[in-house]
Image (cartoon, rainbow, N blue to C red):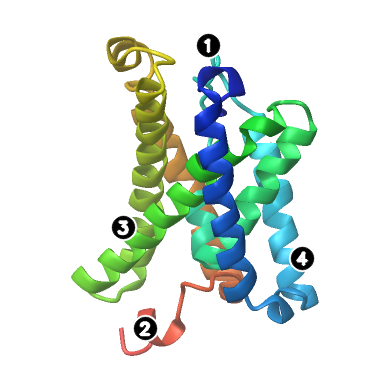
Amino acid sequence: MDLPVSLFPASWHWISLILSLFVFHHLAVTVRWTHVAAPAQLNLLLGFVVSLILLWSLRAGVKPGLNLHLLGAMVATLALGPRLAIVALGLALAGITLNGALEWQAWPLNFLLMGVAPVLAAQLWLRTVERRLPAHLFVFIFVVAFIGSAVTAMLQGALAAAAMVAGSAYSFAFLASDYLPYLLLLGFAEAWMSGAAITLMVVYRPDWVVAFDDRRYLIDK
């Protein structure tokens, strides 16, 4: 999932940089930074950043750009909200870049594919479930957290694969046989990891999960 700079033409990286700057501007004017500066919220954000750096450092792959690792986008989105989740994933990506796992020139493209896109997918899944299914604790844990995490991880992998095909990095036939099938296993692992994390936070520290509302999911249920 960590796409090296050599897989894509320079134009892709310049366009990704411009789009990333638009994302930065949107975050700068919409995030409540005074709220983020509060010790509890800041510690939660930094805790996610460190956890994601460690999580993304544990990966497997045989070819450039075809690394597989857990994503954590759904957990971050549910706990921090979509805007701060993008901030957390972006900082985590900067962390692994500082460690030498990725070139800085490839950071904007990876930021869009590994940070912005999966968070938007996670937020869309959350809103769709809230509209279509009853407000129940088990719906939140199993449908949103467990299933949503798997769907988000697999969609992110499919989007990265589509980018590699569009950029002529790999052929679709090769990815379909040697990469895409493993996304099912990754989705299963992502579901258990993220679902367990959200379950523990909802039970012991519900104030850490901004998407969880006691009045919606517990009262009169």
Q: Determine if residue 200 is in view.
A: yes
- Residue at image coords 55%, 61%: 200
Three-letter code, disc 2:
Arg
Crowding at dot 3, Cα within 10 Å, few <14 / some 14-19 / many 20+, comes out as: some
**Residue 43: which disc?**
4
Three-letter code, disc 1:
Lys
The local secondary structure at tag 4 comes to helix
Q: Which residue is mark 2?
A: 216
Three-letter code, disc 4:
Asn
Crowding at dot 1, Cα within 10 Å, few <14 / some 14-19 / many 20+, comes out as: few
Q: Which residue is mark 3?
A: 143
Q: Which residue is mark 1?
A: 63
Q: Is residue 97 left or right of residue 10?
A: right
- Among numbered discs 4 and 2, the one appearing first in the sequence: 4
Q: Determine if residue 195 is in view.
A: no
Report how far apart the C-alphas of labels 1 and 4 lie in the structure: 36 Å
- Among numbered discs 2 and 1, the one appearing first in the sequence: 1
- Among numbered discs 2 and 3, the one appearing first in the sequence: 3
Residue 96 image point, x, y percent: 72, 35
